Image: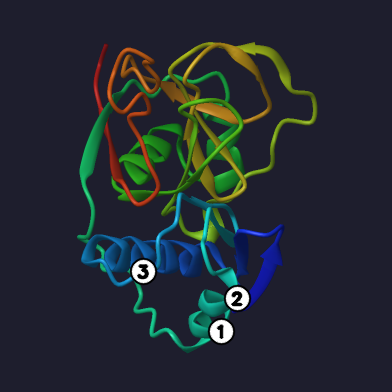
Amino acid sequence: MRVLRVGTRALLVEVGSDGEVQALHAEISRRRAAGTLPPVEEVVPAARTVLLDGLDDPAALARDLPGWRVPPQAAGDGTLIEVPTRYDGADLAEVAALWDVPVEEVARVHAGTEFRVAFCGFAPGFAYLTGLPERYAVPRLATPRQAVPAGAVGLAGSYTGVYPRSSPGGWQLIGRTEVVLWDPAREPAALLAPGTRVRFVPVDR
């Protein structure tokens, strides 16, 4: 763990993996809920970092953080959200070839995995989901699409993501869902937040 000062009221905590990010974010959330974390306005996890912003005394927390015991996040911790998905994406055959499996096996493997939101970004409501073993990592498209439809389920590296709205994108598309990922009229607007567990449920239509 490496703790860096950012500006006058923030800390950036660097760790070695997305699993460590998830464990640290969960521990911060536990301490915050228990009232044992100093007041913080915002906690923002990313691929290898967690930003704590709006601290009254960042120097004191910077001294304490390296001594924290941060247990791995338990598999069953967090809210579970199911995402009905039709596995008919434009890149399904390409992903099957990269995995060296039959096309129907892609859906079986993907739907048989429990994912967890590691962090959010790229677009409002877009969540980076971890859970697939590294052997199923796939490259982004060499030439991104100019428009990916809302609800498209894609893979990039070892991450899974669902496009919350139509946008350009270079992820390998394996399916689609009608679940609304981002709704400003909803509270919270984003369906998926860091720490949320996610399962994709195959549907025929």
Q: Could you tell me which secondary element the residue under label 2 belongs to?
A: helix
User: Which is nearer the eye, 30 or 148?
Assistant: 30
Q: How many marks?
A: 3
Q: Which mark is residue 72?
A: none
**Residue lying at 47% horizontally and 66% vertically, measured from the top left:** 19
Above or below: residue 98 compared with residue 93: below
- Residue 172 in which image quadrant: top right
Above or below: residue 58 compared with residue 2: above
Residue wearing tag 2: 59
Residue 86 location, x and y as percent?
34, 20
Residue wearing tag 1: 63
Q: Residues within 10 Å of mark 3 (few under 14, many from 20)?
A: some
Q: CA distance from mark 3 to mark 1?
A: 13 Å
**Residue lying at 53% horizontally and 38% vertically, measured from the top left:** 96
User: Which is nearer the eye, 20 or 176?
Assistant: 20
**Residue lying at 51% horizontally and 25% vertically, measured from the top left:** 124
Outermost residue toward the right?
Answer: 143
Residue wearing tag 3: 37
Q: CA distance from mark 1 to mark 2?
A: 6 Å
Among the two numbered marks 2 and 3 on one chain, the one whose residue lies closer to the N terminus: 3
Please identify the quadrant where the N terminus is shown.
bottom right
Above or below: residue 170 compared with residue 41: above
Q: Could you tell me which secondary element the residue under label 3 belongs to?
A: loop
Q: Is residue 100 visible?
A: no
Q: Is residue 153 visible?
A: yes
Q: Are marks 1 and 2 in contact (CB under 8 Å)?
A: yes
Q: CA distance from mark 2 to mark 3?
A: 14 Å
Q: Amino acid at mark 1?
A: Arg
Please give left or right for residue 182 compared with residue 20 in the image. left
Q: Amino acid at mark 3?
A: Leu
Please give left or right for residue 21 compared with residue 94 in the image. left
